[in-house]
Image (spheres, rainbow, N blue to C red):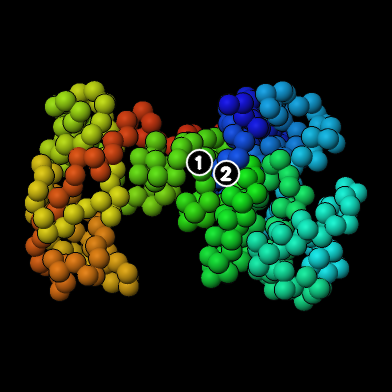
Amino acid sequence: MTALIAADGLQVRAEGRLLVDVPALEVAPGEVLVILGPTGAGKSTLLQALGLLRKPSAGCIRWLGEALPWPAPLAARRRMAMVFQDPLLFGGTVRENVTYGLRLRGLPGPEIAERAGSVMAMLHIDHLADRTAATLSGGEAQRTALARALAVAPDLLLLDEPLANLDAPIRERLVPDLKAALRALKLTCVFVTHHQREALALADRIAVLHQGRLEQVDAPGTVFRRPATTFVARFVGTPNLWPGRIVGRNGALAEVAVAGLHLFAVSALPVDAEVQVCLRPEAVALGTATGPNSWEATVGAVQDQGSTLRFHLDGPLPLKALGLPSDPRLQGLAPGQRITVTIAPEHLHLIAEGAAQAAPSLDPAVQSANSEG
């Protein structure tokens, strides 16, 4: 399938500094691609290039396989809609804001009313249609900005951290509504965020950007459970990372020497490979001994987080683990007590040492130049 939009050998420079260097990135028709990364990674710069708002210093943006010239023709820009952190509403009513793009395109009145009413209902602002923009809360204003973009049925929707300025409860209510609207309208979307929960909730694929370069582009579950680099592992909240070396193989299993233990992991990496051993805290089984990767650990600390218990465990491998308060094996577990730790080989992920370090900075000033994200 031909990508709807693609970056091909894309570089973006500013004042002689290389801000973004993306050899290849494609977005398929109907896909929601989330660009995820820390502040200063170049996310907004990349989005602006994809949105034909920023001139590439090298390479090009392709639309359905065809390279777009610079400046891009108006017809190409009209295929896209963009929403920013600031909703940028006009002074009229919600309805007037939502219908603005439709009126600009000269659509018939009944079609304007039908399309505007549909997207306002999707985003639960139809009851606000006659309210003026100045009277809206932050969440209502951003829903209005999103509805305005959705109403024109763009071929490509570009969202530059549109939820970043909203309080967490408002953001959490808006994310599922936005996801449902994107699915209902079958829109292609590129969404920029530094919030991992937003990325997991919305993405078909996640592109992790760091210092202007792509570290990994994969399905959400792959990014979070099988990170390609230690930067990705740390960024997505993997607390258990240890250096190790593969000392043997048994079929699909690699035997890894790590901190005096020999553990088995599902991996195709060869013997003698230096690796980082990566383990999600929820993948640690506590109180059972049913596999080759088992040992005794001492509870160092227990944190009750309501729906989960977080354990800090001391032993040959100091590690962090999560458990459920309803698990009878964990009830009453206190610091100083001993417990069996077991890790299934398929839950241990090995990152080859050559990929273990994040990409070097493109320029010492990249992060400050990319301070918009």
Dot 2 amino acid type: Val
Q: Nearer the viewer, residue 144 or 354?
A: 144
Q: Nearer the viewer, residue 154 or 115?
A: 115
Can residue 151 be seen in this snapshot?
yes
Report how far apart the C-alphas of labels 1 and 2 lie in the structure: 7 Å
Dot 1 amino acid type: Arg
Residue 294 on image: x %, y %: 11, 48
Kindly identify which residue carries mark 2. Answer: 32
Q: Residue at x 69, y 33 (%)?
A: 13
Can residue 210 be seen in this snapshot?
no
Determine the image quadrant of residue 332. Answer: bottom left
Q: Nearer the viewer, residue 187 or 342?
A: 187
Kindly identify which residue carries mark 1. Answer: 205
Q: Residue at x 44, y 44 (%)?
A: 220
Can you say which quadrant of the picture contains the N terminus? Answer: top right
Q: Report whether 340 appears left or right of 117.
A: left
